[in-house]
Image (cartoon, rainbow, N blue to C red):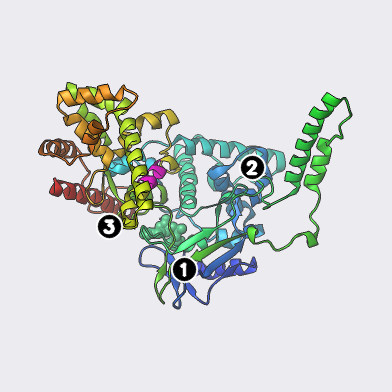
């Protein structure tokens, strides 16, 4: 979605060198990549363990070290909104006066065709993705109020900073002609496109910088299954100044804690405490750092380390996270051909199917309220037993544990939330819906254990279902009955699954961008996404 113009490569490398960063240009070269924009390639064979990039944290760009850091802090703006506003000021107001401009100017949004996340597309364009997993699982076609609110906050702040400090207003973004709907829409879209471009590049640095842009690190493309890099950064630093280890803020905090303790003791003993005044804390906080106090500290750096051996001419990949195309597209604006992490969400079809029969209504309610958690607890118990067995048994293959990892990753994915697609739900809502997030087919065309357990519950003989329900009310539910939910799929189960799948209606693969406001690149991604879901469904049906 965002591509860096190859003409800028030398500017970026120069910026890194000028800020005393180390980019291993003996081993790496930045050049055009077949998969999109530019990428980083091995110039020679490189051994794993090699540090390809080392940057002082002052060279990265975050809201906390931007030119308007103090204004953002005073107005309590943080997170991606703060980074977006800071980026806009740096690139449109401070420009050449900004330390980061030589780097930031290389991240451009194309004003001729602004790339927006799907939730901000026209209704007609959204139809191209209606019913896909991006829509039904991630809710990425739903309007995202957070960005609209962020835009309004940014406009208010720009107006206030202008009147309080004469800080110019970024005209192209925040100076609206409120009587002109087109002007308002254009400037809002620019703001959203900027946020989207930034979100495809950010790294989580530490609890001072939070999300930030890291020169050169953001030029590595994404690999779904076998990334080559590890990003290293000490996260646990002072959230006020970014210092690792002891700093003035921590000392002040500790002293005021000690003082509070002394105060408690002195109250009991009737002695006068030594007081740490607010002035002293301020004094400590504002004391200038002597040059000789600034020692080189490895914790002040971020690094990219190679974790695979690479051969000459191979592209070196990072990982943006283990994600299916539906998530990659909503969050970063691109898709990967034949992504083995792709899934097909069937949650809506399951819900609709259950409404068709009184028995299914009752049993799906039981599954949601009781069965899902019961089955989960039982499976965890079994896995713990298995692990204990494996730990004590030399003959067990390591591969047997694989599915545990898969599950953990998926659960993590859903907890993550998505800034671009607004996936994040209320916690309660998420709890009550979590059984539905297991109603999907994986890339191999298989269902997970919970989906199977649910289907078995719907199809159990009435007498056995009653035993299962009764047993779930006891302190020690009957394992033999719960086990039935794990047994192999019967002809009846398959029939039911086919009914659910047949209700899934995917949009047609679009031929080209004619009649849309989307680019050919976006249409290609939509095609990959729909085709992949359709292949998965086919794989499942072939197996049933
Ligand atoms: C962090 S940038 C990577 C550098 C980018 N190629 C450039 O030219 O600036 C992320 C963007 O690169 C592209 N990209 C990264 N990995 C990709 C992949 N595996 N397939 C297609 N595009 C990818 C997407 O456009 C994504 O929004």
Q: Quadrant of the N terminus?
A: bottom left
Residue at image mark 3: 338
Q: Earlier in the sequence, mark 3 or mark 2?
A: 2
Per the model, the C-alpha gap separating discs 3 and 1 is 27 Å
Residue pictured at 89% horizontal, 28% vertical: 271
Residue pictured at 38% horizontal, 60% vertical: 223
Image region (quadrant) for ligand 1: bottom left
**Tag shown at residue 6:** 1
Is the residue 142 above or below the residue 65 in the image? above
Q: In the figure, is residue 75 to the left or right of 484?
A: right
Contact, mark 3 vs mark 1 (Cβ under 8 Å):
no
Q: Position of residue 64 (x, y in %)?
A: 63, 48
Q: Position of residue 430 (x, y in %)?
A: 39, 32
Is the residue 475 above or below the residue 298 in the image? above
Q: Earlier in the sequence, mark 3 or mark 1?
A: 1
Ligand 1 within 8 Å of disc 1? The answer is: no
Visible residue check, residue 174: yes
Q: In this picture, which residue range is highlighted in magenta?
A: 407-414
Q: In the figure, is residue 443 to the left or right of 5?
A: left
Residue pictured at 45% horizontal, 44% vertical: 189
Q: Nearer the viewer, residue 396 or 6?
A: 396
Q: Nearer the viewer, residue 363 or 439?
A: 363
Question: Which secondary structure lies at badge 1?
Answer: helix
Q: Quadrant of the C terminus?
A: top left
Per the model, the C-alpha gap separating discs 2 and 1 is 33 Å
Residue pictured at 65% horizontal, 58% vertical: 300
**Tag shown at residue 185:** none
Give the overall secondary structure of the magenta segment: helix
Frontmost of labels 2 and 1 is: 2
């Amino acid at each position: 979605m965002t591509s860096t113009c190859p003409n800028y490569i030398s500017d970026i490398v120069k910026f890194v060198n000028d800020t005393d960063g180390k980019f291993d240009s003996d081993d790496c070269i930045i050049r055009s990549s077949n998969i999109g924009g530019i990428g980083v390639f091995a110039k020679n064979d490189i051994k794993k363990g090699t540090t390809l990039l080392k940057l002082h944290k002052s060279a990265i760009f975050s809201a906390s070290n931007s030119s308007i850091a103090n204004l953002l802090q005073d107005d309590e703006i943080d997170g991606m909104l703060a980074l977006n506003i800071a980026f806009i000021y740096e690139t449109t107001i401070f420009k050449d006066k900004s330390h980061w401009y030589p780097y930031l100017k290389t991240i451009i949004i194309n004003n001729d065709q602004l790339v927006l996340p799907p939730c901000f597309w026209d209704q007609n364009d959204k139809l191209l993705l209606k019913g896909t997993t991006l829509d039904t699982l991630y809710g990425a076609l739903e309007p995202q109020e957070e960005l609209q609110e962020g835009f309004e906050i940014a406009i208010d702040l720009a107006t206030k900073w202008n009147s309080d400090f004469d800080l110019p207003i970024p005209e192209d973004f925040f100076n609206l002609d409120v009587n002109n709907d087109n002007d308002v829409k254009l400037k809002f879209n620019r703001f959203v496109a900027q946020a989207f471009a930034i979100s495809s590049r950010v790294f989580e640095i530490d609890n001072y910088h939070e999300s930030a842009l890291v020169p050169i690190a953001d030029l590595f493309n994404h690999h779904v299954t076998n990334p080559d890099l590890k990003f290293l950064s000490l996260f646990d630093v002072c959230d006020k100044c970014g210092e690792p280890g002891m700093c003035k803020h921590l000392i002040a905090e500790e002293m005021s804690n000690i003082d509070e303790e002394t105060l408690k003791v002195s109250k009991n003993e009737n002695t006068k405490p030594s007081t740490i005044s607010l002035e002293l804390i301020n004094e400590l906080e504002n004391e200038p750092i002597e040059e000789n106090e600034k020692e080189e500290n490895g914790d002040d750096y971020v690094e990219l380390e190679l974790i695979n051996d690479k051969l000459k001419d191979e592209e070196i990949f990072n990982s943006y996270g283990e994600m299916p195309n539906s998530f990659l597209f909503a969050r970063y604006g691109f898709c990967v051909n034949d992504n083995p992490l792709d899934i097909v969400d069937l949650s809506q079809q399951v819900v609709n199917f259950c409404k068709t029969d009184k028995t299914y209504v009752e049993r799906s309610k039981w599954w949601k309220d009781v069965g899902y958690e019961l089955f989960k607890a039982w499976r965890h118990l079994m896995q713990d037993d298995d692990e204990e067995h494996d730990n004590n048994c030399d003959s067990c293959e390591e591969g047997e544990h694989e599915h545990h990892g898969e599950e953990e990753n998926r659960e993590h994915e859903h907890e993550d939330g998505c800034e671009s697609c607004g996936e994040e739900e209320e916690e309660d809502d998420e709890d009550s819906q979590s059984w539905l997030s297991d109603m999907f087919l994986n890339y191999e065309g298989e269902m997970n254990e919970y989906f199977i357990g649910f289907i078995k519950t719907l199809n159990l003989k009435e007498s056995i279902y009653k035993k299962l329900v009764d047993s779930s009310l006891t302190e020690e539910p009957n394992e033999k009955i719960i086990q039935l939910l794990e047994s192999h799929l019967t002809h009846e189960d398959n029939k039911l699954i086919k009914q659910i799948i047949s209700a899934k209606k995917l949009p047609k693969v679009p031929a080209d961008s004619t009649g849309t406001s989307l680019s050919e690149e976006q249409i290609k991604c939509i095609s990959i996404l729909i085709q992949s879901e359709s292949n998965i469904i086919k794989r499942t049906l072939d197996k049933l």
